[in-house]
C-alpha cells in the first residue's frame, strides 16, 4: 500500500501562482511514476502532468509552459508549480502514484485549487 498526502491548494487570483506538494509513503518502488490529475465541476478527470523516478515528464497541452512538475526522490515527494493561473484551472487536484506497469495505482484525497477572475 502507498499513502499520498497532498498540500498547497487554495484560492488565488488569475495570473497568480500556487505550488502543490504530494508526499508518498508506504511500499514505495524505486521505479515509479507520480502525477497530478484534476477534475473540475461537471467535467471528467484529466491528467495534468506526470513524472517518472528518472525525471521523464509529460504535460497536458493546456498547462504546457505554465505548470512544472518536479520531484525529490529522497523524500518521495512530487511538486506541481502552477504559474499564470487561469480561472479554467479551477478544480480539485489529485496526486497519483504508480509503477511503470500500472502508472496510476493510488490516489490522494485531492486538494482544491480555485482561481478567481
Image: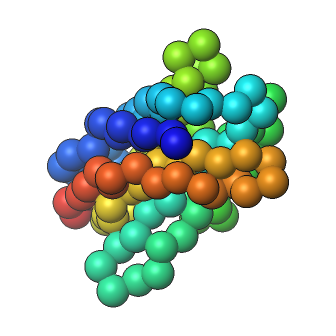
Q: Count the labels in the image.
A: 0
In the image, what residue occupies the spot 30% across and 36% down?
Answer: 7
Q: Is 10 left or right of 66, judged from the image as shown?
A: left
Tell me the residue at 80%/48% (across/down).
100
Image quadrant assignment for residue 88: bottom left
* 36 in relation to 46, above or below: above
Residue lying furthest bottom: 42
Q: Splitting the image into 4 quarters, where does residue 14 fall? A: bottom left
Q: Position of residue 8 (x, y in %)?
A: 29, 36
Residue 82, x across and y down, in percent = 45, 43
Nearer to the camera, 85 or 3: 3
70 or 108, nearer to the observer: 108
User: Considering only vertical position in the picture, is 69 above or below 112?
Assistant: above
Quadrant where the C terminus is found in the figure: bottom left
Q: Is residue 113 visible?
A: no
4 is higher (above) or lower (below) than 46: above
Of 87 and 48, the residue lying toward us: 48
Q: Is residue 28 visible?
A: yes
Residue at left offset 51%, top offset 40%: 2
Which residue sits furthest top? 74
The color scheme shown is: rainbow
Place of residue 78 in the rendered image (x, y in percent of width and height, measured from the top left):
53, 32
Amino acid at each position: 500500500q502507498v499513502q499520498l498526502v497532498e498540500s498547497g491548494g487554495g484560492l488565488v487570483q488569475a495570473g497568480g501562482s500556487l505550488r502543490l506538494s504530494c508526499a508518498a509513503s508506504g511500499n514505495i518502488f524505486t521505479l515509479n511514476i507520480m502525477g497530478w490529475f484534476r477534475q473540475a465541476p461537471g467535467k471528467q478527470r484529466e491528467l495534468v502532468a506526470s513524472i517518472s523516478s528518472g525525471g521523464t515528464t509529460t504535460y497536458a497541452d493546456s498547462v504546457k509552459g505554465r505548470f512544472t512538475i518536479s520531484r525529490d526522490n529522497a523524500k518521495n515527494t512530487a511538486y506541481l508549480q502552477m504559474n499564470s493561473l487561469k480561472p479554467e484551472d479551477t478544480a480539485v487536484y489529485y496526486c497519483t502514484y504508480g509503477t511503470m506497469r500500472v502508472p496510476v495505482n493510488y490516489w490522494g484525497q485531492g486538494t482544491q485549487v480555485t482561481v478567481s477572475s
